[in-house]
Amino acid sequence: MAMAVETLIPVEEYLRTSYSPDVEYVDGELVERNVGDWLHSLVQRNIIVALSRRYPHIYALPELRYQVANTRFRLPDVSVLLHALTTNILLDPPFVAIEILSEDDRMSRVIERLLEFAAIGTPNIWVIDPRLKKMFTFHGNTLQEVDGDVIATGNPCLELTRAEIFQE
């Protein structure tokens, strides 16, 4: 019986290579992401536009490479930074990491990503489900649905309404 052999990619090669669409890097392997469908892209745009309009002093950026461990790089759907970067990739935790669920996402993979964001000290982690029009926060390794119409951070307070996120 033949076994599949995977070629591990060095971190340096991953960082100097452009991928289209971009991929994540997990312990030497390139990991594709579920992106590109209409609802995912629309919600991603809505979040970036709304945050940028409400808070022109912050940076709401799509799919910025984020080093969560020596051999792990993730691409949150939206990273919110309070200051401009001085490097090409995000080495320190963003103020907010936002994951937008796609129809093909597996919850175990989403939770793995959220745990990595939390482990490195990301203070605010949001999960947005465009199909069910639900918003969640991830704190203390717990995913909790937002009951009201506003999802918000702590200090400084950044908030978005359900209507801003899910407008069509």
Image: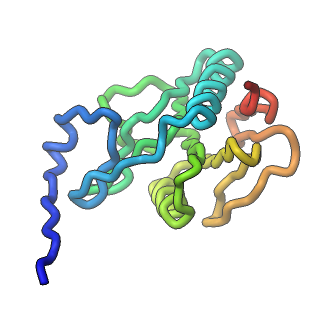
Residue 74 visible, this orientation: yes
Check the image and report above or below for 50 versus 34. Answer: above
Instruction: Residue 133: give x, y in percent of width and height.
Output: 76, 43
Dividing the picture into quadrants, the one containing residue 89 is top left
Dividing the picture into quadrants, the one containing residue 141 is bottom right
Residue 118 visible, this orientation: no
Check the image and report above or below for 145 versus 12. Answer: below
Answer left or right for 162 relative to 141: right
Residue occupying the point 51% across, 39% down: 77
Q: Quadrant where the C terminus lies? A: top right
Residue occupying the point 70% across, 41% down: 153
Q: 125 or 17: nearer the eye?
A: 17
Answer left or right for 43 relative to 119: right
Q: 70 or 17: nearer the eye?
A: 17
Q: 154 or 164: nearer the eye?
A: 164
Answer left or right for 57 relative to 76: right
Instruction: Residue 9: give x, y in percent of width and height.
Output: 15, 53
Q: 165 or 153: nearer the eye?
A: 165
Q: Residue furthest front?
A: 1
Colour setup of the view: rainbow
Residue occupying the point 64% across, 48% down: 127
Count of number-bearing discs: 0
Instruction: Residue 37: give x, y in percent of width and height.
Output: 54, 36
Dividing the picture into quadrants, the one containing residue 159 is top right
Instruction: Residue 6: give x, y in percent of width and height.
Output: 16, 64
Q: Residue furthest bottom?
A: 1
Q: Quadrant where the N terminus lies? A: bottom left
Check the image and report above or below for 38 versus 34. Answer: above
Residue occupying the point 34% across, 47% down: 24
